Amino acid sequence: MMKLFFNTLFFFFILFLSENSAYSLSNYQIKEICQKKTTRSTCIKKLKLRKLNLLQGNKIEIPVIPFNK
């Protein structure tokens, strides 16, 4: 009985502890990423638009880069 109580208490504690939030890039990080690109201004515009969409709760596309050994 006590084990069941502690398991449910632990479950609800973890459930309320975890947040459903996403962290976006700061403006400095966006500038650092786009520093090496040839089309720097379009890169900054795209990343800022994605950041705005993420903060508003809209879906964004995240490119997946395959890992090569």
Image (cartoon, rainbow, N blue to C red):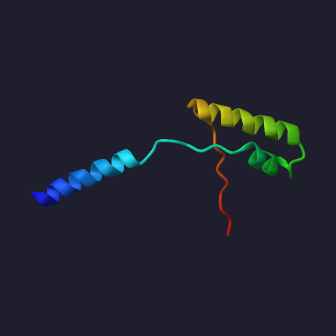
Of 44 and 18, nearer the camera is 18
Image point (68%, 65%), residue name: 68
Of 58 and 56, nearer the camera is 56
User: Residue 39: percent from the left, percent from the top?
Assistant: 88, 42
Left or right? Give the position of 46 relative to 21: right
Where, quadrant-wise, is the C terminus in this rendering? Answer: bottom right
Where, quadrant-wise, is the N terminus in this rendering? Answer: bottom left
Of 69 and 13, nearer the camera is 13
Of 20 and 67, nearer the camera is 20
Image-quadrant location for residue 62 = top right
User: Residue 55: percent from the left, percent from the top?
Assistant: 60, 34
Outermost right residue: 38
Image-quadrant location for residue 5 = bottom left
Outermost left residue: 1
Q: Is residue 53 above or below residue 6?
A: above
Image point (80%, 39%), residue name: 44
Left or right? Give the position of 48 relative to 2: right
Left or right? Give the position of 35 relative to 6: right
- Total numbered circles: 0
Outermost bottom residue: 69
Image point (35%, 47%), residue name: 15
Q: Is residue 57 above or below residue 16?
A: above
User: Residue 48: percent from the left, percent from the top?
Assistant: 73, 36
Left or right? Give the position of 22 relative to 50: left
User: Residue 30: percent from the left, percent from the top?
Assistant: 76, 45
